[in-house]
Amino acid sequence: MYKHLLKLRYAYHPSIKFTHVHPSTQYTPIKMTVREAINLAMDEELAHDPNVFLLGEEVGQYQGAYKVSKGLFQKYGGDRVIDTPITEAGFTGIAVGAALYGLKPIVEFMTWNFAMQAIDHIINSAAKAHYMSAGDQKASIVFRGINGATAYVAAQHSQCFASWYSNVPGLVVLSPYDCDDAKSLLKAAVRNPNPVVFLENEILYSESFELSAEARDPNYLAPIGKAKIMRPGDHVTIVAFSKMVQYSLKAAEQLSNEGINCEVVNLRSLRPLDRETILESVKKTGRLVCVEEGWPQSGISAEITALIMEAGAFKYLDAPIQRVTGVEIPTPYAFNLEAMAFPKTEQIVDAVQNVLKGVR
Amino acid sequence: MKHFMRFSKISKAFQEVPSQYVYQINPIKNFEPIKQFRVIDLEGNLVAKEYNNIPKEILNQIFDLMISIEEMDNLLYMSQRQGKISFYMTSFGETATTVGTTAALQPQDFIFPQYREQGSFMWRGFTIEQIVNQCIGNHLDGGKGRQMPVHYGSKDLNIVTVSSPLTTQVPQASGAGYGFRVNGENKIAATWFGEGAASEGDFHSAMNFAQTLKCQTLFLCRNNHYAISTPTDDQFRGDTIAGKAPAYGMRTLKIDGNDLLAVYNGVKYAREQIIKNKEPFFIEFITYRIGDHSTSDHSVLYRSQEEIDSWKSGNNPINRLGLFLKKQGLRQFNDDHDNQIRKDVRNRVIAALKHGSEQQSPSIQDLFTDVYDEVLPHLQEQYTQLREHLTKYKDQYPINKFKGGL
């Protein structure tokens, strides 16, 4: 069992500790970080299907640029966990080719910001292949990486790509919030025959959440295209995804002290969007606040707003919809400027108060 | 503006050329590796006497700068560990390449850096204070607090701002070099990139276009053996990066990057050739990254301390230049003086960090300026909304730390 370790050219440092446990053991920890949940999902899927493999920069011997793939290289070897040379366009193209052949790659981008040079492969090749080949060519592939703001990394490392990818037919676009989402959505993504864009968040990697009994089951896959009501309420609906769910929950907590009950909807799936859950919630509350980290123009909130107009929920609205989004600038670095460039709890509280007053 | 015009059509009519053919299958596998140009050996002895032609003052200035950068890098790395700045990248072991090259170029030459070229910046006059203020992101930063640490640039010094996505600067240098040739300028576009960055698709496009369009571009590859944790064996095969350049039809040199005299002479030669022939030139420096990739890296996780120490003591650019200067009697000062230089730099960095951290942050107006050439109405509106928000929640924000307050 240790022979493949001896073949490693570089002895890895003894201070590397594995903090999650192999799924085949009886005990699975109840609380873990999102990073560990994603690691566990990949571990289970690599074990479950020999066609699944992980590739990207630093994912193997370095244990992952953000340590998300820790331990996987040692466990599955260099043929299943591949350290690529530096070229997103190159390794994404290679992965799409492997997927068209029938393998199931998981492509890790160090950040979605660096995937822009690979977007031609994601969209023109992976997303459109099935349709253009009249169903002959499937690309069962998962593209994952960190998306949106991270802190102190400025414009070229902080963009949110949710609206870009959720615009494209043929792609499935998912964005988890907590450990349940991260683990069961990623497993569902790997097993889904369509190309999936999986938008993670670096700050959430270190947050701990309880893993529910359902998500602990190695056979459980989250339903794609279903949002989750994180907190039920009657007065206002707050729709968010990824990191913004956290701020929305904090805002809802703060507002509940004033007797305002907000229903917080965690989208989880940006494409397909869970239109039903959003509409049912708006019909119940009559007021809607959409929160996203990305820029407002052509964003997720813009799509939800249009949806409400079109799907017969308009007559249920008691006030115009409020959007809380990132400021429309390339992200600056200086701590004070960056702090004001993205939505926080205060802005969401403000927006809820405005929607209750019926003002814009 | 002179245009490059073809005065006659190139004919592709078939012509039999017997010498073009062979009559046995003999595939080409490995070219003979290009050898590294060297002037001084590992102990600073002169092994290529005709290149001992650099003025004494310049050699001494270069040496002073190399040891200053070593001290500055040390302190700024530690200051990141202490939480004073959020990120830093050191250039231990590679300063002969950056300082030597920039000294051999002309001030009007454009430099397109990657991120490890503080040597280039500082040779041209970028100060310790400018570096520290940029890393802190205070209102004194020339970049208005917009960029993360080490992403500086300077229009005055003809150095294009550092940009995170790898290798994008390389085709940009081909483009600038094209402009210089077409306008008949006595300028070149010199671009830096690591051996890992040379794996990107942009590298191929840049090289191919530079040679076919005849751009006044100097390609400078710092082969420091590691791209974060990826060693060169996993990055490419073939004869390093230099082995690829002749395939583009480009003049190529491989230089011992820890040999300052070789670097200086090689770059000087390359620049002359570029201006004379109006064609690009490729140089690869073989060097070693003694430090971590950045403050987010811990390189002993993937390489041994023995390996690092073998380069640090056995093939170190500062030691080699220092020994050469001593043996030739060219070093103007003694060891005490060198220690004093190091001490002065340390004090200066510490003072800059202290002063920089006491400064206010950039003005909130700078959130909205420079997105376009003028602040458009929608941004003006958002600025107004922000001011209302800050007025309402003024106890939650450190407004007194913002330059210009609200």
Image (cartoon, coloured by chain):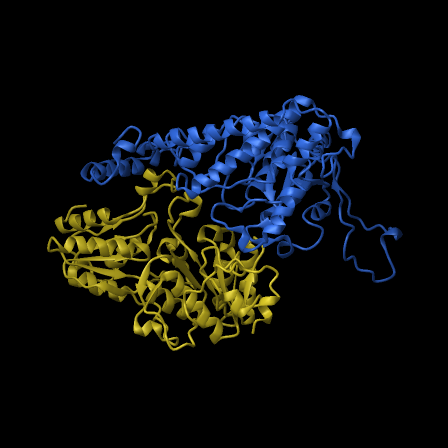
Horizontal relation, residue A154 to residue A121: left or right: left
A73, above or below A257, in the image:
below
Chain that appears yellow: A
- Where is residue B236? Give x, y as percent: 65, 54
- Where is residue B220? Give x, y as percent: 64, 39
Decide which of B379, B309 is in the foreground and name it. B309
Horizontal relation, residue B169 to residue A267: left or right: right
* Residue at the farthest left position: A259
Quarter holding residue B210: top right
Report the quarter where the N terminus of chain B lies: top right
Q: Count of labels shown? A: 0
Instruction: Identify the residue at image location x=39%, y=31%.
Output: B354
For chain B, the rendered hue is: blue
- Where is residue A16? Give x, y as percent: 48, 60
- Where is residue B18? Give x, y as percent: 89, 52
Decide which of B117, B107 is in the foreground and name it. B117
Report the quarter where the C terminus of chain B lies: top left
Horizontal relation, residue B206 to residue A144: left or right: right
Q: Is residue B82 visible?
A: yes
Instruction: Identify the residue at image location x=34%, y=72%.
Output: A215
Decide which of B20, A334 is in the foreground and name it. A334
Decide which of A107, A73 is in the foreground and name it. A73
Q: Is residue B286 visible?
A: no
B164, above or below B132, in the image:
below
A207, above or below B370, in the image:
below
